[in-house]
Image: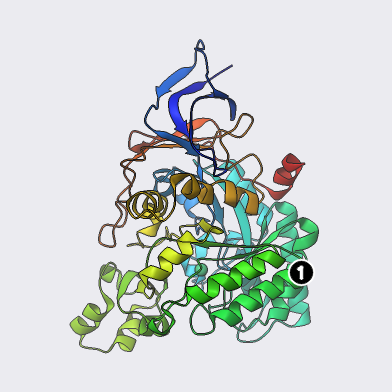
Amino acid sequence: MTDWILRGGDVIDGSGRPRFRADIAIAGDHIAEVGAVGRSTGAREIDVSGKVVAPGFIDVHTHDDRALFATPEMAAKASQGVTTVVVGNCGISLAPLTLDDAPLPPLDLLGDAADYRYPHFADYFSNLDRNPAALNATCLVGHTTLRIGAMSALDRPAEPAEIAQMRELLQEALDAGAIGMSSGLAYAPAEHAPASEIEALAALLRPAGAIYTTHMRNEGDRVLDSLEESFAVGRTAGVPVVISHHKTIGRANFGRTAQTLPVIAAAIARQEIGLDAYPYIASSTVLSAGQAGRASKVMVTWSKRAPEQAGRDLSAIAADWGVGIDEAVERLQPAGAIYWTMDEPDVRRVLSFPHTMIGSDGLPHDFHPHPRLWGTFPRVLGHYCRDLGLFGLEEAVRRMTGLPAARFGLSGRGAVAAGAYADIAVFDPATVIDRASFEHPTTPAAGIEYVFVNGRPVWAEGKASGERPGRALRRQQLQAKAQ
Ligand SMILES: [Zn+2]
């Protein structure tokens, strides 16, 4: 029995093929029919003529681990047409870890001590089952999270007994349904982990059919070495690798994506490699003097000791206080920041690369977040695709849907086709655009008209519906479905 009919839209199905005019019938959590759909008693009809009907977008790079519970309507993402989020990126996941004291940076990007309350990864999954969000979620285990749980000191490589404990926790997480492991080797708690430590853990991923994603050790002067280190983990462990938020940072490295992308393309010819990117020239993470020194401008996103400074320029804060930048950084800790460290031609080059998936890297726990949290997908569709013409709309949609579904093994998602899950984004191609700015970072995008998750509307007419049909997507269920 048909529940919804989306009438007369232009279907962009996520595969990259040209759009075609069709009606969509939704029955239960599935797309029942794509084509000329007759009237059906009891079905609710929406006229979507002139609009694009696309698969719901898959945000492959998120830090929504806690947001799924704290803001279950997930308006920051639903308002962009996102229907599935991949959590646990950059080495940091809420599980498996319990904390009594304030989390070390960068774990404090996800939440406070009380949010780290999952001794086993299965506990996190059951919390998701009991408290579903509006969107689907699939989970990576963070290497840094494992390290903090297993090691007595982080300023050295893990010892054999610690590696054994991390392997046990990782195996447990994979058994519970995690789809892979992430690393954040650029951050202090993981920077002393040698490649051999990562490889000892990654060895568990292949038997599980799981994936490795990495916020690389270096995205600046040594970016090529870091790419090679990442590829080597993939080859040694025999697993697919995703290079997170690919970029080259710092003035000295402007233009160097012209070197990195051919290196990535050559690696893709030999082994399974993917990458993601967000469409901005500014990055965002915890506040550090080192990062601030490489940026042309720094904006504070949150500070525990001086919360009133969130949203302000770091040099203005330092001037107000009559101190140098390093002293201001010290006085704000713990804190987060936005760093202007990239060159626009690099951003465009990475976005234009046919293997690049779109991932927001949004930080929902920040008081004054980077606008990528609310703007990433409409910015690619409206600014980079329609206004600048970097690529066609079918290609933009493929990089947000079919490509990530294949890379992360999200079977039944990322396609508008009969039998697929009814995760759908309806948008106006003429008006879709991000409206979140660095000054007003939580302004919802324009032009996203209807968003369905598992056949139920989560976003319509500019607001969240309040429905929470999202599911925890476990690896075993995804793999069973794929067979
Ligand atoms: Zn990262």
Residue at left 73%, top 74%?
Answer: 199
| Residue 481 drawn above or below residue 194 | above
* Residue 46, quarter of picture: top left
Q: Residue furthest top?
A: 41
Q: Which residue is mark 1?
A: 237
* Residue 243, quarter of picture: bottom right
The residue closer to the viewer here, 46 or 111, is 46
Give the structural element (helix, strand or loop) at label 1.
helix
Q: How many marks?
A: 1
Q: How is the image coloured?
A: rainbow
Crowd band around label 1 with a 10 angstrom C-alpha radius: few (<14), some (14–19), many (20+) = some
Q: Is mark 1 within 8 Å of ligand 1?
A: no
Quadrant in which the N terminus is drawn = top right
Residue 418 location (% of width, % of height): 61, 29
Residue 105 location (% of width, % of height): 49, 74
Residue 156 as seen in the image, left or right of residue 66 = right
Quadrant in which the C terminus is drawn = top right
Residue 134 location (% of width, % of height): 49, 40
Residue 87 as seen in the image, left or right of residue 379 = right
| Residue 162 drawn above or below residue 421 | below
Q: Residue furthest right?
A: 207
Residue 345 as seen in the image, left or right of residue 224 = left
Residue 190, can we see it? no
The residue closer to the viewer here, 170 or 247, is 247
Residue 12 location (% of width, % of height): 49, 38
| Residue 195 drawn above or below residue 471 | below
Residue 460, can we see it? yes
> Which residue type carries mark 1?
Ala
